[in-house]
Amino acid sequence: MSINATFRYQHIEELPGLVVSEAALTQFSFQPHFHLGYHIGLVTQGVLHQTWNNQKYHLTAGQICLMPPGVVHHGTGQGEDIYHLTTFRVTPERLNSSFFDCEYRGTGHQLAPIVIEQASLAQSFIQLKNLFASNNEADQLHRDSLWTSNMAELLRIAEKKPQQEENYGLSKQQLTTIRDYCEANLHNKISLNQLATLSGLTRFQFIRRFQKQTGLAPHAWLTCLRLERACASLTSPNAMIADIAADMGFYDQSHFNRVFKTAYQVAPSQYRLQA
């Protein structure tokens, strides 16, 4: 291995079967090899020249390369230029769960290597990588939702499925159940799996229908609910801000302060003084 190569691997605990790697490479070549899982690769800087099935591809920022198991491929950078590579390494079992979420069931074996030209989706995967790297427990619902939505769009493109608009929102009863559950569990981590199960929907169905019904993604709606409840708690002069942060499910007081100030343009302590 070249001394001009650095690799970092992160095992995603809440999504078993997913490992995210980052690499910074100069004059480094990947020798012919294959994987037992699916690799979703994104070049974030520079160029990666990659070859499979005797075809050459030049991967740059804004593109996504989906490499299925068993396909022999190799690659190299451009001359002495540095290139950065982010890869989502997905086991077949984890990918099958994404097929189930988006209801493309039993078709995973048909996937072929593909380069996807969609800058917005590539940027969304980079955002997801950054959320995973932050290791912020309060953002679990955000991470879950973004992973599910990104994979649904990736598989839709790979499977050449038409884009479909969601025609249905949640029922009044479903929305009431979700709100009651969130209100009762603000101090806990709330996962996408829990909310989807309560609604009797797949994860992807829940995200789409919830957003159609409320106008917000689930994680954004939950953050808003937590902040509004925090505002009410701040009117009590005896309540400690650190306790409010914990009771509302924020990672710590620093995280609470940052999110609160972004939403209301003042720190919680200033809000309390002005209440």
Image: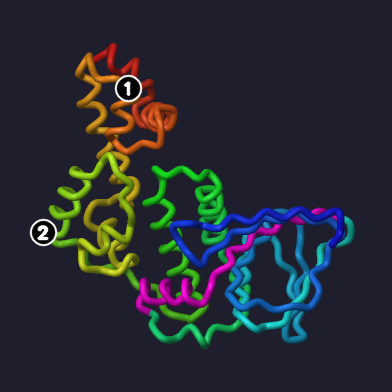
Q: Which residue is mark 1?
A: 241
When the figure is inspected, residue 186 is found, relative to residue 274, above or below; the finding is: below
Query: Which quarter of the figure is the C terminus placed in?
Result: top left
As helix, strand or loop, the secondary structure at mark 2 comes to helix
Residue 86, given in percent of the width and then of the height, sits at 64, 58
The answer to whether residue 165 is above or below residue 158 is above
For the residues carrying marks 1 and 2, which lies nearer the camera in this image?
1
Residue 89: percent from left, percent from top:
59, 67
Q: CA distance from mark 1 to mark 2?
A: 34 Å
Q: Position of residue 204 (x, y in %)?
A: 34, 66
Residue type at tag 1: Ile
Mark linked to residue 173: 2
When the figure is inspected, residue 86 is found, relative to residue 186, above or below; the finding is below
The type of residue carrying mark 2 is: Gln
Look at the image and give the residue range highlighted in magenta: 81-103
Q: Which numbered dot is residue 128?
A: none
Q: Nearer the viewer, residue 154 or 132?
A: 132
Q: Position of residue 227 (x, y in %)?
A: 29, 33
The reply to whether the magenta stretch includes residue 98 is: yes
Label 1 element class: helix
| 59 or 22, nearer to the observer | 22
Residue appearing at x 20%, y 26% in the figure:
232
Residue 17 counted in the magenta span: no
Colour treatment of the image: rainbow
Residue sticking out furthest to the top: 273
